[in-house]
């Protein structure tokens, strides 16, 4: 794979690749009205997209906005279906093949064969290795970026992209994808956004690993975990990271970024991680407790929805299975059984 992207844009614009993008974009959404309508004239619609891209007349549609409240309130933006196909094509044909190899091994969000649970295992392994290297007492530095997606500077992002992308047509199309009328911020909800966000903080990753030479470091999107020998070192790294993201990426660290003794464990990706075991967060347990009350209420009032309950319950079991929580899970199952929910 060449180090830069040159003269490939139009060669990747084939019906087969666009059809594959449609298949990925429609996964789990086959019953949605916009997908059904698009598939009524599938070949014609895909060819139209390709012609518009080739002739530089493709225009992205208007965003639809909605709010989610879990795990915290966020504004999600969604483009029309045809645009989501184009995003799939763009990411799979250009971003993944040419940028994946630039990512460090210990960044895990939204990347193939990585993900939440592998990031947790990585942190635990790093804790074990730190214990061997530093002894029983050392420090954890936990940082995250303030309002990350809303704060990404598009001009800086384009400079990062252009250092790799030398294909003029592809670079212009990248600008078109990013152009939503705002100079700062990328939409939460776009398939492209999660990859742009990873590319943006890849600059921090390489600063941490290549320049600061931090041995134990893990990133999951905008959350970073550093394992350091002393309190003084943790304080210094916090200041250096804060300065770097401000000066080079026009970002601010969240005021909750802090360093603390390793004995408190590492609060990361929904778990409290120790070298010897992994626990569920208290917040997760509170959420489960609240959900059980809702399930019992619905069941007692004959408005219980079995499918929705099953999805929630399986999600709970899946999350808990990656922790040392046998007794807790058993307790929950007894409560569900006693209330005729199992």
Image (cartoon, rainbow, N blue to C red):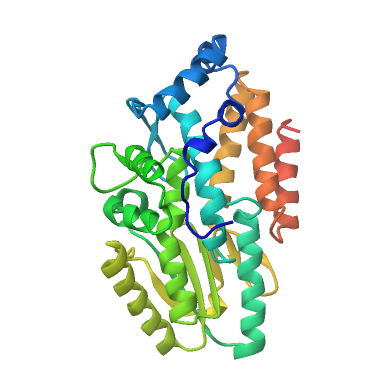
**Which residue is painted at 58% across and 44% down in the image?**
289
Q: Quadrant of residue 83?
A: top left
**Which residue is painted at 37% across and 58% down in the image?**
160
Does 230 sit above or below residue 299?
A: below
Coordinates of residue 109 in the picture (x, y in percent): 54, 54
- Residue 296 in sight: yes
Q: Quadrant of residue 143?
A: bottom left
Q: Count up the numbered dots.
A: 0
Q: Quadrant of residue 118?
A: bottom right
Coordinates of residue 272 in the picture (x, y in percent): 58, 64
Q: Quadrant of the C terminus?
A: top right
Q: Is residue 162 left or right of residue 250?
A: right
- Of residues 160 and 279, the one nearer the viewer is 160
Coordinates of residue 42 in the picture (x, y in percent): 56, 15
Coordinates of residue 257 in the picture (x, y in percent): 38, 69
Q: Is residue 209 left or right of residue 28?
A: left
Does 292 sit above or below residue 256?
A: above
- Residue 109 in sight: no
- Of residues 47 and 305, the one nearer the viewer is 47
Q: Quadrant of the N terminus?
A: bottom right
Does 91 sit above or below residue 202?
A: above
Residue positioned most to the top: 40
**Which residue is painted at 61% across and 31% down in the image?**
295
């Amino acid at each position: 794979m060449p180090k830069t992207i040159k003269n490939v844009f139009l060669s990747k614009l084939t019906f087969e690749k666009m059809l594959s993008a449609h298949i990925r974009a429609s996964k789990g959404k086959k019953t949605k009205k916009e997908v059904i309508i698009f598939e009524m004239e599938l070949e014609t619609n895909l060819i139209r997209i390709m012609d518009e891209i080739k002739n530089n007349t493709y225009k992205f549609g208007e965003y639809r906005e909605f709010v989610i409240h879990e795990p915290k309130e966020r504004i999600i933006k969604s483009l029309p279906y045809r645009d989501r196909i184009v995003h799939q094509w763009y990411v799979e044909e250009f971003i993944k093949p040419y940028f994946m190899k630039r990512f460090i091994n210990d960044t895990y969000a939204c990347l193939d064969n990585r993900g939440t649970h592998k990031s947790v295992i990585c942190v635990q392994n790093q804790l074990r290795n730190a214990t061997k290297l530093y002894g029983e007492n050392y420090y954890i530095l936990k940082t995250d970026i303030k309002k990350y997606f809303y704060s990404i500077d598009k001009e800086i992002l384009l400079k990062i992209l252009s250092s790799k992308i030398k294909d003029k047509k592809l670079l212009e199309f990248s600008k078109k994808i990013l152009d939503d009328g705002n100079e700062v911020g990328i939409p939460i909800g776009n398939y492209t956004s999660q990859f742009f966000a990873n590319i943006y903080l890849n600059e921090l990753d390489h600063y941490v690993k290549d320049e600061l030479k931090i041995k134990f470091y893990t990133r999951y999107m905008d959350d970073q975990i550093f394992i350091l020998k002393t309190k003084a070192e943790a304080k210094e790294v916090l200041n250096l990271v804060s300065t770097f993201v401000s000066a080079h990426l026009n970002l601010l660290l969240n005021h909750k970024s802090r360093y603390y003794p390793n004995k408190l464990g590492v609060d990361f990706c929904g778990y409290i991680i120790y070298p010897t075991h992994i626990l569920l967060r208290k917040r997760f347990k509170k959420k489960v407790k609240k959900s059980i009350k809702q399930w019992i209420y619905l069941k007692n009032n004959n408005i219980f929805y079995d499918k929705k309950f099953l999805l929630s319950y399986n999600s709970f079991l899946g999350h808990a299975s990656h922790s040392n929580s046998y007794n807790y899970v058993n307790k929950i199952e007894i409560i569900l059984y006693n209330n005729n929910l199992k």
